[in-house]
Image (cartoon, rainbow, N blue to C red):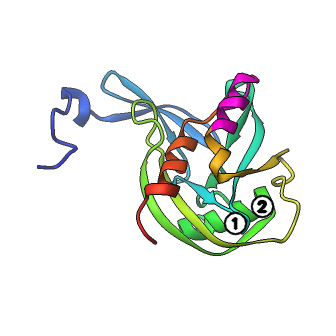
Amino acid sequence: MNPRDHLAPADADAPEETLYQGRWLSLRKRGRWEYVERNNPGGAAIVIAVTPDDRVLFVEQYRVAVRARTIEMPAGLIGDLAGQEDEDMLLAAQRELEEETGWRCARVAFLHQGPSSAGMSTEMIAYVRAFDLVKVGAGGGDASENIVVHEVPRRDAGAWLFARAAEGYSIDPKLFAGLWLLEHGPAV
């Protein structure tokens, strides 16, 4: 049985309608359901990166949508650069890791892919693991970003995240999935 067919609502096969199309996102409707679709077909990559001294890399930045500073793992859109619309997810992950954190990795490996918010968006996110990191720059993102890099001892990462939440930071719940994958994910 196809998982798409199991208990699918009647409007699953209704025609799609575009309610609004912006540069990065489109608001779509199928039957009575509204949802957001990324205009880049590649989705996003989240990078699980650990430095040679066993520190997990996190990034902090202000996110307009939630009006708060957030703590996230290095991540970015796949194929969002002009002329690189067919960018490979692993290359995008390496690019985003170095751009955001200043760390370059020798290789990355795919761990898992799934929807970022299945009830609201068609976006798929891929978790990738970065290996053999070398510090090559300051990080901080591109000209449109103001990213602060945090290097947190792996054994303290969960407690550190909860402490940041207590201080008022918005903590992306996908971080905890990333930490779980770091400890229990597939051998790569």
Q: Where in the figure is residue 64, as x and y percent of width and height? A: 74, 29
Which residue is rendered at x = 61% and y = 70% of the image?
A: 91
Mark 1 residue element: helix
Whether pointer 2 and pointer 1 mark residues with C-beta atoms closer than 8 Å, the reply is yes
Residues at marks 2 and 1, CA–CA distance in whole angstroms? 6 Å
Q: For the image shown, how many numbered marks are present on the structure?
A: 2
Q: Which residue is mark 2?
A: 99
Instruction: State the image quarter where residue 120 is shown.
Output: top left
Q: Is residue 86 visible?
A: no
Q: Inspect the magenta stretch and tell me whether residue 164 lies in it.
A: yes
Q: Is residue 28 visible?
A: yes
Q: Which residue is mark 1?
A: 95
Which residue is rendered at x = 60% and y = 36% of the image?
A: 172
On screen, residue 36 above or below 157: above
Q: Label 1 is placed on what type of residue?
A: Arg
Instruction: State the image quarter where residue 165 is shown.
Output: top right
Range shown magenta: 159-170
Neighbourhood count class around disc 2 (C-alpha, 10 Å): few under 14, some 14–19, many 20 upward? many
Instruction: State the image quarter where residue 134 is shown.
Output: bottom right
Q: Label 2 is placed on what type of residue?
A: Glu
